[in-house]
Amino acid sequence: MEVTLWTKCVFEFIGTLMLVLMGDGVCAATTLERSKAKGAGWIVITLAWGFAVMAGVFIAGPYSGAHLNPAVSLGLAVAGTFPWNEVLPYCVAQMLGGFCGAGIVYIYYRDHYKASTANPDGILGTFCTMPAIDHKPMNFLCEIIATCVLVFLILAIGTQANTPAVGLGSIGAFPVTAIIMSIGMSLGGTTGYSLNPARDLGPRCIHALIPLEGKRDSGWSYSWVPVVGPMVGCLLAAGLYLLVY
């Protein structure tokens, strides 16, 4: 297969779709009424989100590098390890993938969404992130720090000193999976650890569009935090990487 920019974007779309399908899927499974997984808890959610990232990396990694996240694409470009002319096409593909992945989650769990209208906050939380304590300056800082950790560690994994130990190709999915799980368990309790505008904004748009009686607003007053925060965090991570390495 000839790997053109179009090919890369197609795989970024599919990989991000899979990430959000499985990630928002576990949120739906553990939250919605009459789901067999209801109440399974935070550990299940963080583990499943890590494996969701791994699934996306296995799909897209050989062709696009599996960024699956506009913050990762921007951070790698600032660090000099990704071409600038591919950043915008990657971001568009990722945002569309997140949108479509969340749409499939809604279709898959449609009966359970109908059974959960008494919990509008929980329904919103199956699509996008909302803070445990609504304090936007601190929420913004949390997203900056958590995304900085993510992107800095991804950059560190890719250094020449680490590459022989980590291995090549799809094997690189395993340390990234562990990073996502660790961030979720350690730093995810404040905001739900978006880390990724494509994981948050596209699904939030799906929530706004679904014809579900009794649903709440889509949290638009907060929606800038999980978009702008990760983008600032990735810039900070790239700067730290260039300073340290």
Image: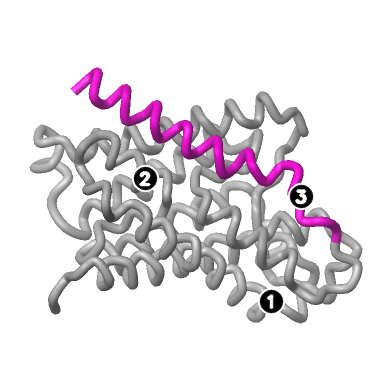
The mark found on residue 219 in the picture is 3
Q: Look at the image and give the residue range highlighted in magenta.
A: 216-245
Q: Quadrant of residue 161?
A: top left
Question: Dot 3, how many residues are within 10 Å of its Cα: few (below 14), some (14-19), or many (20+)?
Answer: some
Q: Quadrant of residue 34?
A: bottom right
Q: Amino acid at mark 1?
A: Tyr
Question: Where the C terminus falls, by quadrant?
Answer: top left
Q: Position of residue 193 (x, y in %)?
A: 57, 41
Q: Residue at x 45, y 69 (%)?
A: 18
Instruction: Specify which label sits upstream in the sequence, 1 or 3.
Output: 1
Question: Dot 2, how many residues are within 10 Å of its Cα: few (below 14), some (14-19), or many (20+)?
Answer: many
Q: Position of residue 78 (x, y in %)?
A: 29, 35
Q: Amino acid at mark 3?
A: Gly
In the image shown, does 38 or 167 lie closer to the viewer?
167
How many numbered marks are there? Answer: 3
Q: Would residue 238 be found to the left or right of residue 141 on screen?
A: left
Q: Residue at x 31, y 58 (%)?
A: 66
The alpha-carbon separation of the residues under discs 1 and 2 comes to 30 Å
**In the picture shown, does residue 54 fall above or below 139?**
below
Magenta region, mostly helix, strand or loop?
Answer: helix
Name the residue beneath numbered marker 1. 109
Q: Residue at x 36, y 37 (%)?
A: 151
Q: Residue at x 42, y 44 (%)?
A: 71
